[in-house]
Amino acid sequence: MNQVRDNGFAAENVQARRRDERYNMTQVSQTESSQSLGRYSSLAVAAGIGSMLGSGIIVGLSAAITVWQEGLQLSNAQVGQLSGIMTFAIAFGSLMGGRIADKIGRVFFFNWINLLYAVGAVVCIFAQNFWTLLAGLIIAGWASGADLPVSMTVVSHDAPNVFAILAIFAVIAFVWRVTSPTFKKFHDEADARDAQMGVTAHDTNVSVTKILFGRNKVMLLSFLAAILIFYVGWNLLANTWGQFQTFMFAKAGASQSLATGLGIILNFITLILNIAFASVAGGKYRNKAFVAGIVIQLSAMIIMALAGTNLWIVGATAFMNLGSPLAGEAIYKVWTQESFPIEIRASIQGYINGFSRLCCGLFALITPMLVVPGVIQKTMWGFAGVVFVMSLAGLWMLGLQKKYGTDEERQLQEIHGAK
């Protein structure tokens, strides 16, 4: 009996030491993070290039589509098919990328996926007909969709000329990710921390369904529903303006050169604003910024609906672009990384991205018919309704985070509770 009792005490002591080690590692990790986040800036930039490429293919198609339509003699239906099928490709990439990365290794996937994107972009550059252009968009679209959720998880874990630029960036990202000794060091350090803390971030046998419907199913499914509704709504707007902004300007009365120029200028301004406001998404004022963002976007949509078919739509689009960085892609990425366990983050974000892209792809097939002068006003009122629904979902998400906290905070509470 004494031996059994001693063995029991020994086992309890081992468990206690392990809990202390995990707690100390967490505390050290937090201290190091607060003191030296700057050292990870290059990794964030490399992952950010992947996100830029994903947005870039949509913006690139928007800027080039009127040129391609005239040069390749494309019909409005073919314009919708190019946009819709490319969006489907992005969706399937998002759906499949996370699981593929979990199987073959996230770092390996993170390093090599941009080479496939570059191949697709080069095909677009030299396309001389509808089918070749479509093939290039499918390849680049799938690669961009697959890259985004994996890039975000790795970070949290540790005109035709437009397409030429995107191809160059893709090659740069590929070479940088594969050859950088700094990134390899970050990956190795993260793996070492996980091993010491008992985290199984690379477990290929983890069941997303089992975790979602496990003991925290109410919390996790609520997070999933709120984020999914918000992002689908926001992405419908972003995808439509990203792909058809120039097309809408042309149908509103702008010349082809003016429509293309305005589209490029507004997209460039949006890029600058996204960079400028990216830090807000992770800061203490992000909830206030989110509310301001949805108010701006809703107001802009109402202005567009009232403006009808004239070029007021240009000014309203510029106004909408002020709100989108505050209540859009950036806050969505923060929410997904904060809310779910790291074992399923890539898969969850892939599912959300994929489903939203499928919705966008279906809508893109008919978008050219919905933004012509005869019906665009009704379409804008419909978009105003979309903004309203996504705003409610976003406010719901703010309430959920206030109630449940972040995944890191919940882990710390479990460690304290076990001590």
Image (spheres, helix red, strand yellow):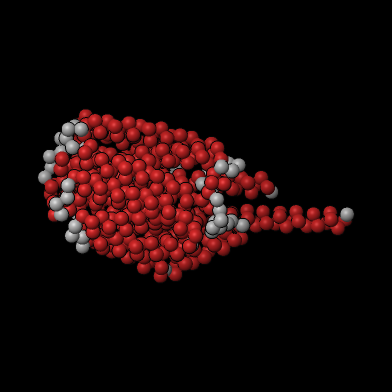
Q: Residue furthest front?
A: 131
| Quadrant in the rendering for residue 322 | top left
| Quadrant in the rendering for residue 115 | bottom left
Q: Is residue 153 left or right of residue 319?
A: right
Q: Quadrant of the N terminus?
A: bottom right
- State the image coordinates of residue 397 (x, y, percent, origin top left): 46, 37
x 54%, y 44%: residue: 212
- Which one is nearer the viewer's eye here, 268 or 376? 376
Q: Residue furthest right?
A: 1
Q: Give the total of numbered labels.
A: 0
x 44%, y 47%: residue: 351
x 69%, y 48%: residue: 419
- State the image coordinates of residue 73 (x, y, percent, origin top left): 14, 52
x 20%, y 52%: residue: 64
- State the image coordinates of residue 242 (x, y, percent, origin top left): 27, 46
- State the image coordinates of residue 316 (x, y, percent, origin top left): 23, 37
In this orientation, does residue 60 appear? yes
Q: Is residue 114 left or right of residue 284?
A: left
In this orientation, does residue 28 appear? no
- Which one is nearer the viewer's eye here, 344 or 182? 344
- Which one is nearer the viewer's eye here, 273 or 143? 143
